[in-house]
Amino acid sequence: MSRMGSKDELSGRQSASTPRSLPEGWERLTIAALLKSGGSIKTGPFGTVLKAAEYSIEGVPVISVGEIGPGVLTIRKETPRVSPEILKRLPEYRLNDGDIVFGRKGAVDRSALIAPTQDGWFLGSDGISCRCKKQRTGFCPILSEQQWLRSTGRSWGECQF
């Protein structure tokens, strides 16, 4: 018997493999379809591209797995930063409003949506960014909320769009 549609017997929650129903007018879209429609996925720079010695105490925050919480970015005093010169040299790692960042190692279940006030921050080496095509501006916030829901076990009714 297939476990699709089954509920976790201990918690009563739907299993992770169970497709959830979507609100009317929404479509289910895979990451592959996102990429085919003009979106992108990017890992952060490796040490050959950006050396730790290039981090600074001034400039824009470097978003690594330590800054990514469940649906939120936390910038601490210790958070490394990069200068405007680094951003200019490595524009492909610049985060834009509406991107989603994920941890690439360690806490891979955490993700956050880049807010307008975080536009221009820098993707760290242990991060992954997911960028949606402009015509799908509503998709990235929804994907971000979906990732948060999975990591916390909450329901669609608790989303705030």
Image (cartoon, helix red, strand yellow):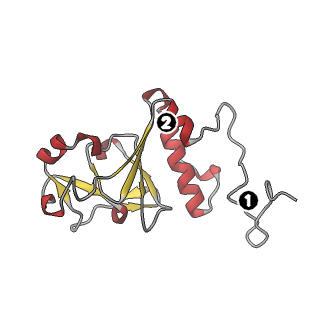
Residue 77 place in picture, x, y as percent: 21, 67
What is the three-letter code of the residue carrying label 2? Leu
Residue 111 horizontal side relative to residue 53, left or right: right
Using the numbered discs, state the Cα–Cα distance from disc 1 to disc 2 in whole angstroms: 28 Å
Single out the residue that lies furthest toward the front.
48
Using the image as rendered, state which of residue 37 and residue 60 is in the foreground.
37
Residue 55 place in picture, x, y as percent: 16, 59
Single out the residue that lies furthest toward the top.
135
**Which callout, 1 or 2, points to the residue nearer the camera?**
2
Q: Quadrant of residue 130?
A: top left
Residue 85 place in picture, x, y as percent: 11, 45
Q: How many marks?
A: 2
Q: Which residue is mark 2?
A: 35
Sequence-earlier tag: 1 or 2 = 1
- Name the mark on residue 160: none
Q: Residue at x 43, y 29 (%)?
A: 134
Residue 89 horizontal side relative to residue 93, left or right: left
Q: Residue at x 28, y 56 (%)?
A: 46
Q: Secondary structure at mark 1?
A: loop
Please say if 15 is above or below 29.
Answer: below
